[in-house]
Amino acid sequence: MINYPIKRKIQTKTTNYANLGMTLESDIEASNLFYLNHDIAVIHKKPTPIQVVSVSYPARNKAKITEAYYKTPSTTDFNGIFKGHYIDFDAKETNSKTSMPLKNVHPHQIDHLKQVTKQGGIAFLIVHFKVYNEYYLLPANILFTFWDEQHEEKGRKSIPYDTFKTSCHQVPFGYQPRLDYLKVVEKYLLT
Amino acid sequence: MINYPIKRKIQTKTTNYANLGMTLESDIEASNLFYLNHDIAVIHKKPTPIQVVSVSYPARNKAKITEAYYKTPSTTDFNGIFKGHYIDFDAKETNSKTSMPLKNVHPHQIDHLKQVTKQGGIAFLIVHFKVYNEYYLLPANILFTFWDEQHEEKGRKSIPYDTFKTSCHQVPFGYQPRLDYLKVVEKYLLT
């Protein structure tokens, strides 16, 4: 597999917005595989929940699903363990230059991250500002503050880019692992 | 469709075992919901991984999957957090009176449970002996010992029921939660 920087850039351009979502996800999955292979952490993406309606059996031992629908996930996409700590997060992308809209986060994901935090887990979002090609680790407590205030008078419907710059932690994009978010977790979130 | 009682009886018999598997799974899921609602733990079943091949869009905003296949899970079915501890396990059932066959466990599940153990997680199986209607929590280290020895000269292809009786921990079946496996975890597995 050739992996010239310029080739990658072209791919990014042609695959555009739909696949950019895939790219953040696959960058995180590649990082998780690196962590796993180096005994650093065991973190996996959960499968997408699917409601199966009909299954046929055209060949022995090979069930073919012929009707099914995507379900809304009840938790976040990623979880696992890192040095004895429970890790739980989701990945979000935004095209905005100025903020991450809170509508990118589902209410049940907030509930889940709050439950995880209550149990002593490490909860956060990885946010990709596509315009700047910057990745930030947004600790759950900052997310909760903006989320809970959004319906108040002074509340906002988004988290400003400036908050990411000043109060969050940038995740460097590299080669191995591509997104070394656990370095950031270790430095800032473990107590 | 002819539906004589005798036919019906046959159907019930054939569906039997499949539904017992659902029952253990749903008993654990009900217990997890109890734990979640009482702020005791945040443990979820992972969705079944499905490889989607074709999707159609008969109505707006409603993707219909028209061809898909079940994939082999790469991890265990259940994970989460309990009092700051990462919890990871799978559920197994056996019809045997004398042992749990090791072929009930997939090699990748063993790999995964070993990785989790290395990171300091709490790993185990919940094993249901259907004949006795008894549930046991099998700590991962006992599982690993039998697994690793199975190809040796004195190795066995199964874990004897007697090992469950003497070295594992029975999980009581109750009302709320139905299977209070975290009580067993707290008593015997947390240090």
Image (cartoon, coloured by chain):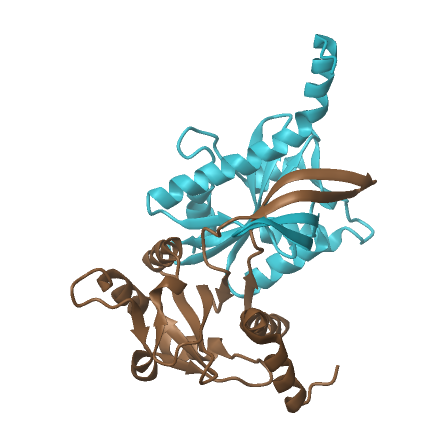
Chain colours: A brown, B cyan
Q: Quadrant location of the C terminus of chain B?
A: bottom left
Q: How many numbered discs, if any?
A: 0
Q: Is residue B111 above or below residue A142?
A: above
Residue A175 x, y percent position in the rendering = 60, 85
Q: Is residue B48 above or below residue B17?
A: below
Q: Residue at x 48, y 49 (%)?
A: B44
Snapshot quadrant of residue A20: bottom right
Q: Residue at x 70, y 14 (%)?
A: B9
Please give left or right for residue B95 compared with residue B174 in the image. right
Q: Residue furthest front?
A: B59
Residue B138 x, y percent position in the rendering = 58, 45
Q: Nearer the viewer, residue B151 or A119?
A: A119
Snapshot quadrant of residue A1: bottom right
Q: Is residue B8 above or below residue A59?
A: above
Q: Nearer the viewer, residue B92 or A135?
A: A135
Q: Residue at x 55, y 57 (%)?
A: A46
Q: Quadrant location of the N terminus of chain B?
A: top right
Say whether residue A86 is visible. no
Residue A54 x, y percent position in the rendering = 67, 38
Snapshot quadrant of residue A118: bottom left
Q: Residue furthest left?
A: A153
Say whether residue B13 is visible. yes
